[in-house]
Image (cartoon, helix red, strand yellow):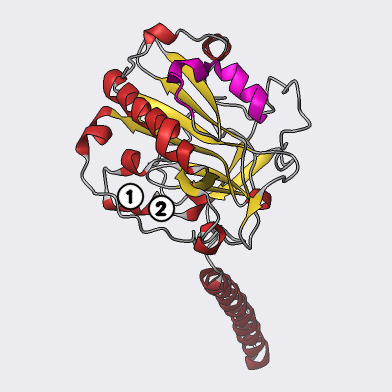
Amino acid sequence: MMVRKKHSPKKKSHRVLKTIILLGIFIGISIHLFHSSFAIRIRESLLPQRTVQTTITVSEPQHVPPKADPVDTLPSAKAVTYTIRCPQYDNLTYGVPGAADSVIEREGYALGYIEKHEQPAWVVYKLTRSEVLAKAVKRTNRFAEDPEIPTGSATAADYRRSGYDRGHLAPAADMAFSVQTMKDSFYYSNMSPQRPQFNRGIWKELEEQVRQFAVQEGEIYVVTGPILPKEKTITIGPNKVTVPSHFYKVVFDLTPPQKMIGFILPNEGSKADLRTFAVTVDKVEEATGLDFFSMVPQPKQEQLERTITVENWDWIR
């Protein structure tokens, strides 16, 4: 008769102990992994949210000014980085005209501010027939310093008793389609020193003509600004705001067949016909060192910028 072996209590308790130890190790590892993952999520939630940035590359001008020395070449950066505050703005749809210390995009316009000269090198905006005809807001004349210029914009003290007007680049009358755009048009970052006879004379006439272009064509893009000298010759105010010798304006008609026209005017009064100041966009690029409408595909861009047909535009007089 076989005798069945009995398991000793010692061996049985050893196996139970081993099982408990392994189970404890497994539970410990699981708890550790859970806490690590939870801690990472907590740390990530406490990190500050990063502002979304967009880098817009500024292409080199295709045309080098024949007399480059008198024209300020502006900041040497190859790209402009700025915060997108409201993606539906479409003022820069056809490109950034040139590098700047600050690029600001608003509902009504975008600008490239040059700290050295305390004014923008360019202001660009889209203008439509409906915006011109709306005339929803009256002119406010509430000039203000621009809070979005990191180094501070020009101020009222710069223009006070200077003998120069606070000349709008994006005109108040072009921004009369909303309360906000009218307010934004009176920032000093949208101003440049202009002689009174120029600001209230032929420059005003050109602004009215551009609005007529918008009404006639339906939708246009406008780029405008001072032609900034390399070295400051005349300045005004405590911030030494540069007084430009000339101003420019470029208009791009989007209605087929598309066309472009440019203007270069001296900062002085003139009774001459506006059409005598009309030039190709190429000529304005040569004078400023900027590159307008760089997002228009080639060879269309080249063809539009080198061509001007004055009679194809609707003139007030």
For the residue pair 238 and 171, the one nearer the viewer reads as 238
Label 1 crowd bin: few (<14), some (14–19), many (20+), radius 10 Å: many
Q: Which residue is mark 2?
A: 186
Residue at 61 percent of width and 59 percent of height: 237
Residues at marks 1 and 2, CA–CA distance in whole angstroms? 7 Å
Q: Is residue 281 magenta?
A: yes
* Helix, strand or loop for the magenta stretch, by majority: helix
Q: Is residue 96 visible?
A: yes
Amino acid type at circle 2 is Phe
Residue 119 against residue 270 in the figure, above or below:
below
Badge 1 element: helix
Q: Is residue 122 magenta?
A: no
Residue at 51 percent of width and 19 percent of height: 277
For the residue pair 215 and 62, the one nearer the viewer reads as 215
Q: Are marks 1 and 2 in contact (CB under 8 Å)?
A: yes
Horizontal side of 69 relative to 59 (left or right) equals right
Q: Is residue 153 visible?
A: no
Which range is magenta?
Answer: 270-289
Q: Quadrant of the C terminus?
A: top left
Amino acid type at circle 1 is Met
Q: Which residue is mark 1?
A: 182
